[in-house]
């Protein structure tokens, strides 16, 4: 099992001096090819920042991020963006309000100089379960779930191998959550994608991921396998608390 | 397809081409604007101004530069022959105002064409990059903002000679800083959004992001601001004309016409009043249109 994504002692610091915020402190993880890896934690635990650091959207203070053994440098090379793509948390904020779906999907193709844009856009829309009718709509003509599908199509249109998912369903209501998660599952099986999924929802992570990392206050609490999670075999106090919290409603 | 009315085609939820999506969006904006009565009045005034400028030769009954008989036709009050009377050179004031609309429109259009892109480019660049780029560009903006328009116009006149072109340059150079500030403020709220992060993640370079993704969002508020500034631009141009720094006689520029009429304002009020009314109506028209556009275009007003 070779690691596709390796993170060693990653630290992310925002601000300087008195305003310094150490969002991520000494996080290490390995994600194998084709694996789905989860990062769980409460708000402000630095889990999203880890994803943003991988894409170069957050300032890395120290540590290393390697993709296929190659250390990432700043600024990222153009080839990096064809390997790694991200789906954002809020589909209402991640689509340009004045761009049609068509424009959203054709931009990455234009940037990377793909020539068969027409066919690729149609295929990408089909793959995420949106028909031709959606192609020339504006974001305000789409529902939340449809928007997130467009965001997934946008991420997949460059045919990346690694998909970073930043709470892809937390802004959606329950019935649509399942729909989007199933879509993500199907896409992974079909294309052999590697997922790095961030969520505060243990149920989502348990459904999607084979292994997960629990984070708190910017640090790793522990790493668990799905089986361990399902058997409630958590070691750390914090993880046990999380497990109890996620069961909170089931007892009622 | 032929069964569907144009309206339905435009408002379709499932546009089938880029063009249809764009036209549909434009149509929605238009029908929203149409509901605002005052904006339509403003638009009407602006359209009349444009038509008047285009067809000035057909609309104006007399030659705007050559007067009639100086002994019998000077300073005639408004009548059915001379709708707005005649001036001290026995020229028909109505004809002069009609031809003057060309100058007014030229000033407005040229200033908008010169100042808007400069303001947008400076503002979005400063706002997007931040840091020292922002500091340098905004200090330059401050310097331009500190130039008094009339003094700068005087300097231009001294350097290049009086004329409407130099007045336009002077106005354009002093009117872009507010657009730059506006665009910068808008850009700073846009640059950290997820959709900009998303396009950055797709490998887009800064110029592409600024022109393709940031500028379209700043555009509407800048357009609104430019429209609202039109009145001020017209007034400045008229003011320069009044001081003798803008259009030179015998050009029928409205400000210059007021200046020449002020000598006999008491006895022959119409000479200065008629161009004054023209400036007032056109400025009001642009203001009303600008207000209406703000309601429709300003993203902050959207529900």
Image (cartoon, rainbow, N blue to C red):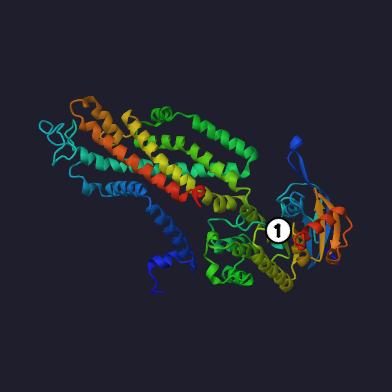
Residue most toward the front? A252
Residue most toward the left? B72
Percent x, y for residue A80? 72, 59
- Please give left or right for residue B263 compared with residue A183 in the image: left
Disc 1 sits on a residue from what chain? A
Count of labels in the image: 1
Percent x, y for residue B294? 44, 46
- Please give left or right for residue B109 compared with residue B193 in the image: left
Q: Quadrant of residue B7?
A: bottom left
Toward the viewer: A236 or A3?
A236
Percent x, y for residue A214? 82, 56
Q: Quadrant of residue B233?
A: top left
Q: Quadrant of the N terminus of chain B?
A: bottom left
Q: Secondary structure at mark 1?
A: loop
Q: Residue at x 64, y 71 (%)?
A: A127
Percent x, y for residue A11? 80, 47
Q: Is residue A248 above or below residue B234?
A: below
Toward the viewer: B30 or B153?
B30
**According to the image, label 1 marks what residue?**
A167
Q: Residue at x 52, y 64 (%)?
A: A137
Q: Is residue A116 above or below residue B53?
A: below
Q: Residues within 10 Å of mark 1 (few under 14, many from 20)?
A: many
């Amino acid at each position: 099992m070779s690691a596709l994504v390796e993170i060693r002692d990653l630290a992310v610091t925002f601000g300087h001096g008195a305003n310094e915020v150490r969002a991520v402190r000494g996080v290490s993880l390995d994600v194998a090819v084709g694996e789905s890896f989860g990062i769980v934690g409460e708000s402000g635990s630095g889990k999203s920042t880890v994803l943003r650091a991988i894409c170069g959207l957050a300032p890395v203070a120290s540590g290393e991020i390697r993709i296929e053994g190659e250390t990432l440098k700043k600024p990222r090379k153009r080839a990096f963006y064809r390997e790694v793509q991200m789906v954002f948390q809020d589909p209402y904020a991640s689509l340009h309000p004045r761009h049609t779906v068509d424009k959203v999907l054709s931009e990455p193709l234009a940037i990377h100089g793909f020539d068969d844009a027409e066919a690729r856009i149609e295929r990408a829309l089909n793959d995420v379960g949106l028909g031709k009718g959606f192609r020339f709509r504006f974001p305000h003509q789409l529902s939340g779930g449809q928007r997130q599908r467009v965001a997934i199509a946008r991420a997949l249109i460059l045919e990346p191998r690694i998909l970073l998912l930043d709470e892809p369903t937390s802004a959606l209501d329950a019935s649509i959550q399942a729909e989007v998660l199933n879509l993500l599952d199907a896409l992974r099986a079909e294309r052999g994608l590697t997922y790095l999924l961030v969520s505060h929802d243990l149920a989502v992570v348990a459904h999607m991921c084979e292994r997960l990392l629990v984070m708190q206050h910017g640090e790793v609490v522990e790493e668990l396998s799905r089986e361990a999670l399902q058997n409630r075999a958590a070691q750390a106090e914090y993880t046990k608390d999380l497990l109890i919290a996620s069961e909170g409603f089931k007892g009622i | 397809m032929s069964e569907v009315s144009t309206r339905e085609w435009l408002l379709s939820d499932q546009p089938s081409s880029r063009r249809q999506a764009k036209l549909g969006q434009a149509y929605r904006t238009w029908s929203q604007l149409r509901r605002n009565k005052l904006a339509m009045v403003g638009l009407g005034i602006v359209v009349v101004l444009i038509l008047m400028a285009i067809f000035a030769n057909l609309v104006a009954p007399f030659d705007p530069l050559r007067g009639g008989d100086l002994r019998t036709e000077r300073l005639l009050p408004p009548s059915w022959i001379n709708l707005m009377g005649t001036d001290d050179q026995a020229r028909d004031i109505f004809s002069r105002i009609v031809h003057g609309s060309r100058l007014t429109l030229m000033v407005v259009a040229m200033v908008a064409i010169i100042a808007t892109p400069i303001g947008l480019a400076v503002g979005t660049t400063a706002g997007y990059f931040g840091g020292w780029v922002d500091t340098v560009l905004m200090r330059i903006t401050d310097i331009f903002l500190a130039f008094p328009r009339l003094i700068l116009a005087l300097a231009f006149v001294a350097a290049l000679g009086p004329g409407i072109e130099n007045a336009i340059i002077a106005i354009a150079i002093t009117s872009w800083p507010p657009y730059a500030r506006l665009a910068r403020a808008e850009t700073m709220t846009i640059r950290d959004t997820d959709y900009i992060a998303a396009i950055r993640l797709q490998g887009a370079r800064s110029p592409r992001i600024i022109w393709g993704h940031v500028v379209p969002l700043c555009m509407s508020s800048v357009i609104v601001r430019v429209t609202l500034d039109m009145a001020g631009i017209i007034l400045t141009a008229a003011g320069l004309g009044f001081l003798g720094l803008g259009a030179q006689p015998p050009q029928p520029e409205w400000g210059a016409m007021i200046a020449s009429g002020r000598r006999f304002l008491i006895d022959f009020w119409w000479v200065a009043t008629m161009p004054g009314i023209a400036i007032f109506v056109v400025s009001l028209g642009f203001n009303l249109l600008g207000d209406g556009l703000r309601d429709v275009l300003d993203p902050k007003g959207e529900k």
